[in-house]
Amino acid sequence: MSEKITRRQAVKRLAKLGGAAALTVGAYGGLYGRNTLAAPETRLEIKSDFRIPGAPDQVVVARSNRAGREAELVAKVLEPLGGMEKFITRGDVVAVKPNMSWDRPPELAANTSPEVLAAIVRLCYRAGAKKVHLVDNTINNAQRCYLNTGIEAVAKETGAGLLYPESKHFKDMDLGGRRLGQWSVFMPVIQADKLINAPVAKSHGLTRLTLGMKNWIGAVGGRRGALHQDIHQSIVDLARFFQPTLVLVDATRIMVRNGPSGGRLSDVIGRNTVIAGIDQVAVDAAATALFDVYPDEVGYILLAEQQGLGRIDPGAGKRIEIAV
Amino acid sequence: MKKSRGKRFTGWRTARRISQAGFLVLFVYLAAEAQVPQGFNASLFAVTGAGKDLRLSAPVTWFFDLDPLVGLGTMLSTWALKPTLLISLAVLLAVLLMGRFFCGFVCPFGALHQFVTMVGRKKSLAEKTRLNQPDSSQHLKYYLLILFLAAALLGSDQAGLLDPLSFLYRGLVLGLFPALGHLIAQATAWAAGSAGPLKFLAYLGPYAFDPVLGFGPRAYQGAFLLGGLLVFMLVLDLVRPRFFCRALCPLGALMGLSSRYAALNLTKDAEGCTRCGLCRADCQGACGPHPEDPWLRHECHLCFNCVAACPEGVLQFKFQFMRPGPEPSPKPPRDAPDLARRAVLASLAGGAALVGLGRASLAGVQRPEPALVRPPGSLEESEFLRRCIRCGLCMRVCPTNVLNPTLAEAGWEGLWTPYLNFDLGYCEYTCTLCSSVCPTGAIRLITGKEKIETPLAIGSAFIDRGRCLPWSGQGPCIVCEEVCPTSPKAIYFVPYETRIDRDRQVTLKAPQVNLGRCIGCGICSNKCPVEGRPAVYVNSVGETRSRTNRILLPDAARKKE
């Protein structure tokens, strides 16, 4: 201990000691009492109501007597409503929500027809949309879904964006429903200027039919399986939260049994029909006829009308049928 | 000094390094391509149309097709020679001519070992010389090879446990890739939340890393062990250079034995040698390049370090189709390892013991293992174990992450072979991708049509009524029926009258499974809202690959509906 040290060494030692002391004090001051648990998410101020005030409220059913006329059907069904230009303005970012949840080829009608989807995307671009995104939180593996449904090809041909759901795309939001409060939302659906709901019409084991409003289950994440414990109210809550600019139901091919996944051509019937409108309830109600089902036999349609979301009967002269 | 080299070509070491780097990059590239492509990559690499079977365009099995150990092992265990295995025999023919060029120029695992050895630890010349001396541990790999081949002959291909390409591929795609993926996801999430230029990094993730590491977060049972073993083998290089290659690699052993009559010789001009000893310092194979040592042909990786190091230029590789007689130099070369007869016999016995003990400890010998659900197209279990080299390729390409390496599910004999872990995924109804990439045919090639129409069942689903929401009186739930992919659905409802809270009489739709239609894909289990231990689970019983692991009495007149 009696070793002598030089002044230089003494200064070095003192500097080290001082540095260590400063770091200790600094760390203590900086970290003391710090809450390391994430603060609960507050409500995000992002709009989820994409309706345009004063948009024409007719329900249009366009039907063709032969298959393969998807582009004409989509164009014609929008004519009485004033065309896509009525809904899309120049520079809009448009989110289109098809059903592309199942790893099934197009002819099995488990997903929105790629031809219908391509027609919608093209009309959006023609109306001046800046970018169109195809968004769905798929049930089957997304990569396989997109390839097998033909939607990857649609995105490539039309220039639409195609998103693969990842955990970073989901945020908890307050849905403000009667049953659903905080729930994980697939954000790309509402991170847009306009939202078009483009479901396929098909059968479903629990709700009988899956149409437009039920398509919103693909717009949320979280424990979606649990929604089936109160499916009709859950759907109505979702439909109240996600208010689209426009609904276009693809009924070119409809799956009449073994829904929603199907799997055999014998489950599918060609109807060559597309239905459009802005009233989610009225559009879904109009689609039920294709299955020989009354609208009030589908729980969520009846419930949605009772809770004031829309009207099963759009009113005199509001239902337009066109042959293509 | 330079003059004395004359016009001799001295670029072989550089050529070897370029070749190693190239094959390592190719190996990683082919591993990166072994997944269902998405987005930009899908438009480039997807080989499918809507409704057609998805196949990968890159030759992802290429390295395994090349591997003579895979070829020979499968040939011995099945007594059949498949066309792809012929490619590996061509490689072996090249070894017969040139020696272990594969170890020096091609093997990506060897390249990694060499790289770690080179940059891992600073060593003095004396230490390097000592570490690169031949020693008896180099014999171990020959005994391991004999052991594996003996086991293969007895119908159990275990060589994949140490085959360098399988070892590297498994550790990489099931261990290090997902591990890196998680770290990068964490880093990008952090970058996304930060301000300034760092934010840009967050957008890099899906484009720069995911196409290689894998789209989406992945997890594999025992990834810690698989990735850890790979890292451990590389760390061993710091203790003894290329330890794996010298002491453990059964493929290297096979090539060492095959190089016995190779025409490519290391010629040593003992007269010009100044005994500087530089040739010993960086010898990768520890094969005695010094004129005073006997050259061990079977240990030489053809790394050309000795040739490049020799200041006098007295070491040269030459093709000599007629071997010269005993050289005047102090020590003649050795052409084959000096294996002890007793040790060879012991290795043969060890191979037999490996198979015997493996089977003795496998519950499946007595009765089928319920958790062992094999991928669709898998051969019957004993035939499967003859072929599977546990490379992990099927688990890598599986789009839902359901395919996982076993730990105990297939017993010791089937360690790290693929099985379906329904916590992590489910078998996609139309998907047959794993069957299209199996390098040895343990999973035979099937089409989506065959899978659906036969149908190929891999197991059966069962409802746990105590946990199922409708059956236990909790309320409605139909998820398992909704996602059931067969048509007609294998899960159907029966009206079930029960009470909620004693007094509320309700009729619920309770799910039941039609075992005649269930294919065991497990999507019901994977999507069941009763997570952790789902209320519907899949066992292997009912698998079409087995004639005994069944439940239903077969109906010869009628196919499965």
Image (spheres, coloured by chain):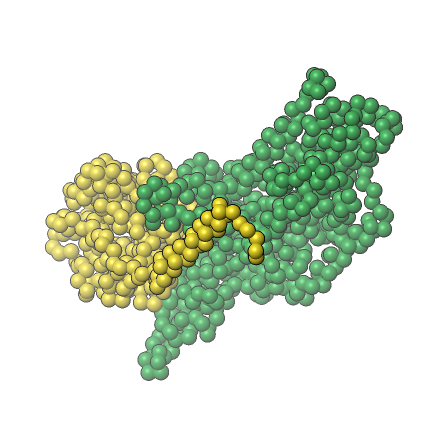
Name, please, the residue furthest toward the bottom: B503
Using the image as rendered, state which of residue A235 and residue B333 is in the foreground: B333
The residue depicted at 65 percent of the width and 33 percent of the height is B105
Image position of B161 (left or right of B496):
right
Using the image as rendered, state which of residue A235 and residue B39 is in the foreground: B39
In the displayed structure, A298 sits above or below B107; it is below
In the displayed structure, A102 sits above or below B317; it is below
Chain letter of the yellow region: A
The residue depicted at 44 percent of the width and 40 percent of the height is B208
**Spot occupied by residue A186 in the image (x, y as percentages of width and height):** 32, 53
**Spot occupied by residue B273 in the image (x, y as percentages of width and height):** 79, 25
**Number of marks in the rendered image:** 0
The residue depicted at 66 percent of the width and 26 percent of the height is B12
The residue depicted at 65 percent of the width and 47 percent of the height is B236
| Image quarter (top left, top right, bottom left or bottom right) of the N terminus of chain B | top right
**Spot occupied by residue B340 in the image (x, y as percentages of width and height):** 84, 47
Looking at the image, can residue A106 be seen?
Answer: no
Using the image as rendered, state which of residue B79 and residue A142 is in the foreground: A142
**Spot occupied by residue A7 in the image (x, y as percentages of width and height):** 48, 47
Chain letter of the green region: B
Image position of B369 (left or right of B152):
left
In the displayed structure, B412 sits above or below A73; it is below
Looking at the image, can residue B471 be seen?
Answer: yes
Using the image as rendered, state which of residue B302 and residue B484 is in the foreground: B302
